[in-house]
Each structure stands twice: as structure tokens, then as C-alpha cells.
Amino acid sequence: MAHHSHTTLNTEHTLECPSNKASCEIISELLGLREQVSELSELVHTDTLTGLSNFRYFMLSLEQEMERTRRTGQDTGLIMMDLDFFKKVNDQWGHDVGNKALILAAQQIRAAVRKMDAPCRYGGEEFAVILPATNVYHTLQVAERIRLMIESTPLVTEEQVISLTASFGIDVYSANVPGRAEEMVKRADGYLYQAKQEGRNRVCYAPIEVKEDISSVSQDEKDALFGLFGGSSEAEQAND
């Protein structure tokens, strides 16, 4: 969006006042309107409560990253997450406190991801993160990092301390795989639903086929699969 502001500054010197006055109200008004258009363009894809990107921007960005994957061969990771028992927060403490919980969750998500990632408010208490050029192992690591940050950061208000948790579903898009953004979201949402069914406050994802030659898997990837997610040491035994 900065592009619009840059254009505004440059055009200030090229615009000529119709009345040939040194100080021209018409040009000043025009430049002011252009600034407002730039600010409104920013608001179009921003969720006003959390400051994250909104649903419209999310779907456009996901389609763009999937196209980039088809072009470059680098995977695109997607995390869908939903605050657990959020209706109880609203019912018990009111919507103002519920909004504060959403804002806090958004802050944790933003702190856990890279600048290149795209954290979004999908709707209600559901969020999404697009991770460009990110494989399944590192997508799992990011999801687990967000989960731990939300779990360890309660909402503190003047009257109460409210513990929050979230459930996660992930999907990773690879090149040469047909499909559109809606289908990727549906798969990730399916694993999010599975996380809810299995007890909440967890990350669910498609079964990963561990390569027979596990020595080709980096230590970070082993940690994502077996360390962070409570897996057994079978993979380490396979490497022996």
C-alpha cells in the first residue's frame, strides 16, 4: 500500500494549479483525497479488531502463493486455528473480554511468525497463517510455537485471569498437485476439526511418510515430527 503514498508525493510536483496560484487549494484537496484512498485501500484487507489481514485478503494471498508453488516448486504451508471454548469466554465474561482475547491471540500469532508469513483473521475466533516456501516439517513447528505461546499467555484483565488454548489443523500445498485455495482450506479445516474432536489444544495434520533414508531428514525436521509433537523415538531408532 506504500506504493500509493509514494505516487502521491511524486505527483505533487507535476500537478499544476488551474488558476496559476503559488498555493492551490485544488491541488491540496486532490493530494488529500489520494492519501485517503491509500488509507482506505489498506483498510479493505485489514481486520479492524486485530489488525491482521482479513478473509478477503487471505483468499487472494493463498491463491497467489499456490501459484508461486506451481512456478517455483517450493511448498506453501497453511495453518488454520481456532480458539478453544471461545463461546464460554463471551458468555461468561462478555464480548468486550472476548474481543480482548482475540486481540491477544492475534498478537501471539504475529510474534510467532516470520515477516514473510501472512497471519489472517479468517472469521470469528478462527485464524489462518499462510507460510510461503515452507515444507510440512516447518509448518508443524510454527503451528506448535503458536500453540505454546497462546497456552502460556493468559488474558489478564482487571477482574480475572483467563487461560486460553487453541486447536490447529495444517495442510501443505506442493507443486504439480491440482486444486484451488478453497480445497486447501477445507483440508486444513478438516484437521482443525479433528484436533477439536481429539481434545483440543493440539495440532493435527495428514500422516507423514517418513523417508526410508531418514539420514536425509534434517535434525530440525526430526524435532518437528518426533520431539515437539510427543512422538516416540522410533525414528531415532531407525536411524541407528
Image (cartoon, rainbow, N blue to C red):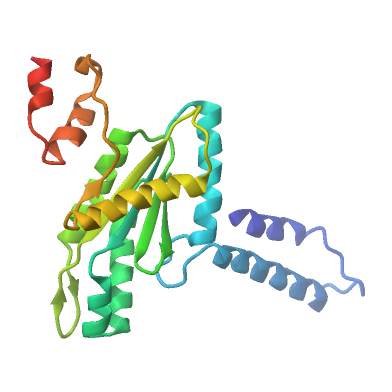
Give the residue drawn at x 26%, y 52%.
Answer: 194
- The x, y position of residue 21, in whole percent, is 87, 74
Q: Examine the rendered structure and indicate whether residue 12 appears above or below residue 207.
A: below
- The x, y position of residue 204, in whole percent, is 25, 46
Position of 179 with respect to 100 (left or right) is: right
Give the residue drawn at x 54%, y 62%.
Answer: 45
**Looking at the rendering, which quadrant does residue 161 occupy?**
bottom left
Can you name the residue that lies furthest to the right here? 19
Position of 37 with respect to 65 (left or right) is: right
Give the residue drawn at x 23%, y 65%.
Answer: 84
Position of 226 with respect to 109 (left or right) is: left
Camera-nearest residue between 214 and 11 = 214
Numbered disc total: 0
Q: Examine the rendered structure and indicate whether residue 125 appears above or below residue 182.
A: below
- The x, y position of residue 147, in whole percent, is 22, 54
Position of 213 with respect to 81 (left or right) is: left
Where is the C terminus found, in terms of image quarters?
Answer: top left
Camera-nearest residue between 142 and 22 = 142
**Looking at the rendering, which quadrant does residue 88 occupy?**
bottom left
Where is the N terminus found, in terms of image quarters?
Answer: bottom right
- The x, y position of residue 115, in whole percent, is 40, 47
Give the residue drawn at x 83%, y 72%.
Answer: 22
Q: Is residue 165 visible?
A: yes
Q: Is residue 79 visible?
A: no
